[in-house]
Structure formats: structure tokens, C-alpha cells
């Protein structure tokens, strides 16, 4: 979201958000950029974790399966009162109740996850600087302090479970170093990015966006190595995007491949911006073409309400209604082994 704000200054305002009243009303402008309000919302959630336990946490989740599979209005998932085991389920005093519906926070320490949260907070502090300066200051200072605490550890905390504790240690540390470098211009983060340069080169396609965004804040030696890595990546990209008639990478694992196609399009945007003589814009447009209908199995748009015919049934909170939310992007065509593409439109 911060990258979208910094690149394009999206000032669209179609939603009213009132934190004091805990009230949101869509289709009602409130004079504030929706994207900044979204960044604010995520920032408050991350800062609350640091205030409560001192580090980022793997997640917060409902306590039972009936809440997890809840298909009604999200407002009815909880009574918003603190659970009190001494009360009957029908009892309440306005603050506490006997309804066992409070979410559980899982607070295990994970250094990679902590780095990912630092990256988000450092980035958010830039976007929020003119919108909510005090929140921006708190975000920046929290990220800086968290980095210093990780640097003081003899060993990183490598607790890992599923997809809730971030990616690899180097991957997440690079995110944090780049965002803190852009935010503070402090040389310690420049050194950290340089220390990770071999890692950047080892998987350039995955790391290209971060490597390029760091370029204006790094020295010429770094720039030369990043350009050389980009030149080597040309042949890798060409091979990867020539496996099908659509000119994109269609992955063949669970949840289909639209996420990968989007990521590669964003990467191409940055590659073209930094090295226009090496990378053209065509992969960006091929990716959009694919999402909007030029793909296997059907010509339906994967973006709800965009295109002549678009995907109307998605796996969202409203899936029981077989309805959709405009702009939502579904996972895409799933390749059933050995080579049968499938895209069910009548099932979420």
C-alpha cells in the first residue's frame, strides 16, 4: 500500500472511517484518502502488538470452528465484550459477558516476522508523515528500536509455523533494511543491504523490487552489481515466460497463479523504471491481459466487476451469498495434473 501511495499518490476517497465511534460507511467520502486510512489501520494493528508484548506476533484468531467458518455479517462474529467464565452465556454487564468468543493472540517470537513488521512500520511512517505525524513518529521509532533489539541478540528467534511467521530470515531482513534505509538514510541500514547483496543476486527475480528501491541510497559499486544481476535475469525471465502462449508464468500448485502473475508484473514495472534499455513494458500488459480474460479455460475476467464478463463468485466473507466485492481478484486457473486447466465459476 505504501508503494502504491508513493508511486501514484492515490487520493481516491469513497469510504468514511470514524475510529472514535468505531463506525465505517462505504460510498460516503470523509475527505481523507482511503489508501492512507488503510495504511493507518494496519499500522495501529502492528503497533498494538509491540505495545502489548514487545514484538510482532504470528497472529490473532477466533477460538472455535463455528466462528472461523462464520458466514454472516462480520459484526455478529463477536459481542465485543470481554469473556468472563463466571458468567452464563446469556449474562452481560456491558463490559463482560459469558460468551466465549474472544480472539486468541499467538505471541511466539520470530525474528523473520519481526523484520517484516519493522519494514511495514518504517514504510508506513513515510506515508503517514503529513497525514498523522504523531503516528508516523511512533511507527518509525518502533521500527528503529526493534532493529536494534534484533541486532543485540546472539541468535535469532527462528520459531516458524505455516505462513504466519514471515518468509526466510534474509528475505525479511532485506525488507526491513531497505525500508529503514529509505526512511532514515542511516548508513547502518546501507551496510545491512550491502551485506545481503549476495543473497539479492542469488534470487534476483524475487528480490529485484527491493534491490531497485534501494538504488538511490546506495553507492556506485552496489549499483553496478544490481545492474549485472538484472542483465543475467533477462534470460531467466525470457525462459520463464515462454512456456505458454500467454507470455506469463502460470504456476501449477495450490491456489492457482494470479498472485505470481501480479508479483511479476509489479517487478517488471520496477525493472523497466530502473533499466528501460534492458526491460520493456510488455510483461506488465500481458499480465493485465491475462487477468482480464486472455487465459486458459475461459475468457472471463478474474477481477470482479472489471470487464464485459467478470468473476462473480469468490471466496470472501460473502461467499455464502454467491456474491462479490468489486475489484476482488480470484486465485485464477488451477492446472489439474497432468495439464487440465480448470476455473469453476459456480463455486467459491
Image (cartoon, rainbow, N blue to C red):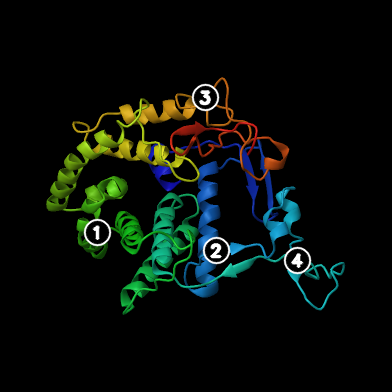
Looking at the image, tell me whether mark 4 or mark 3 is earlier in sequence order: 4
CB of mark 1 within 8 Å of CB of mark 2? no
Q: Dot 2 lies on which element?
A: strand
Q: Is the residue 48 above or below the residue 154 in the image?
A: above
Q: Residues within 10 Å of mark 4 (few under 14, many from 20)?
A: some
Quarter of the picture containing the C terminus is top right
Distance between mark 4 and mark 1 Cα atoms: 46 Å
Name the front one of labels 1 and 3.
Answer: 3
Please state the horizontal and vertical placement of residue 82, each as a whole percent of the image.
Answer: 73, 70
The reply, left or right, for residue 67 in relation to residue 343 is right
The residue labelled by disc 3 is: 298
| Residue appearing at x 49%, y 50% in the figure | 131
Q: Dot 4 lies on which element?
A: loop
Distance between mark 1 and mark 3 Cα atoms: 44 Å
Q: Return the mark for residue 251.
A: none
Looking at the image, tell me whether mark 2 or mark 3 is earlier in sequence order: 2
The residue labelled by disc 2 is: 59
Looking at the image, tell me whether mark 1 or mark 2 is earlier in sequence order: 2
Tag count:
4
Q: Residues within 10 Å of mark 3 (few under 14, many from 20)?
A: some
Q: Is the residue 315 above or below the residue 53 in the image?
A: above
The outermost residue toward the front is 338
The residue labelled by disc 1 is: 193
Give 82 or 67, whichever is nearer the viewer: 67
Amino acid at each position: 500500500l505504501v508503494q502504491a501511495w508513493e508511486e501514484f499518490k492515490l487520493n481516491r476517497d469513497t469510504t468514511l472511517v470514524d475510529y472514535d465511534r468505531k463506525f465505517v460507511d462505504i460510498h460516503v467520502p470523509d475527505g481523507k484518502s482511503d489508501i492512507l486510512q488503510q495504511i493507518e489501520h494496519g499500522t495501529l494493528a502492528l503497533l498494538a502488538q509491540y505495545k502489548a508484548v514487545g514484538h510482532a506476533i504470528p497472529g490473532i484468531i477466533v477460538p472455535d470452528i463455528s466462528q472461523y467458518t462464520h458466514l454472516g455479517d462480520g459484526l455478529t462474529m463477536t459481542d465485543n465484550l470481554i469473556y468472563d467464565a463466571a458468567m452464563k452465556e446469556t449474562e452481560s454487564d456491558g463490559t463482560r459477558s459469558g460468551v466465549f468468543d474472544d480472539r486468541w493472540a499467538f505471541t511466539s517470537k520470530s525474528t523473520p516476522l519481526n523484520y517484516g513488521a519493522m519494514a511495514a512500520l518504517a514504510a508506513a511512517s513515510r506515508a503517514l508523515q503529513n497525514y498523522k505525524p504523531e503516528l508516523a513518529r511512533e511507527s518509525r521509532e518502533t521500527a528503529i528500536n526493534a532493529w536494534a533489539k534484533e541486532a543485540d541478540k546472539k541468535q535469532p528467534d527462528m520459531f516458524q509455523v505455516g505462513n504466519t511467521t514471515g518468509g526466510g530470515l534474509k528475505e525479511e531482513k532485506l525488507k526491513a533494511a531497505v525500508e529503514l534505509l529509505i526512511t532514515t538514510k542511516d548508513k547502518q541500514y546501507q551496510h545491512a543491504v550491502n551485506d545481503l547483496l549476495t543473497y539479492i543476486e542469488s534470487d534476483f527475480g524475487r528480490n529485484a523490487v527491493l534491490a531497485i528501491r534501494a538504488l538511490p541510497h546506495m553507492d556506485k559499486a552496489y549499483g553496478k552489481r544490481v545492474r549485472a544481476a538484472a542483465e543475467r535475469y533477462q534470460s531467466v525471465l525470457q525462459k520463464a515466460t515462454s512456456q505458454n502462449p500467454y507470455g506469463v508464468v502460470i504456476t501449477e500448485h495450490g491456489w492457482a497463479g494470479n498472485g505470481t502473475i501480479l508479483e511479476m508484473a509489479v517487478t517488471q514495472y520496477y525493472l523497466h523504471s530502473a533499466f528501460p534499455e534492458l526491460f520493456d513494458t510488455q510483461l506488465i500488459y500481458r499480465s493485465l491481459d491475462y487477468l482480464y480474460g486472455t487465459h486458459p479455460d475461459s475468457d472471463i475476467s478474474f477481477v470482479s466487476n472489471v470487464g464485459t464478463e467478470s468473476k462473480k463468485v469468490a471466496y470472501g466473507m460473502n461467499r455464502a451469498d454467491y456474491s462479490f466485492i468489486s475489484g476482488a481478484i480470484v486465485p485464477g486457473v488451477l492446472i489439474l495434473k497432468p495439464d487440465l486447466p480448470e476455473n469453476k465459476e459456480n463455486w467459491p
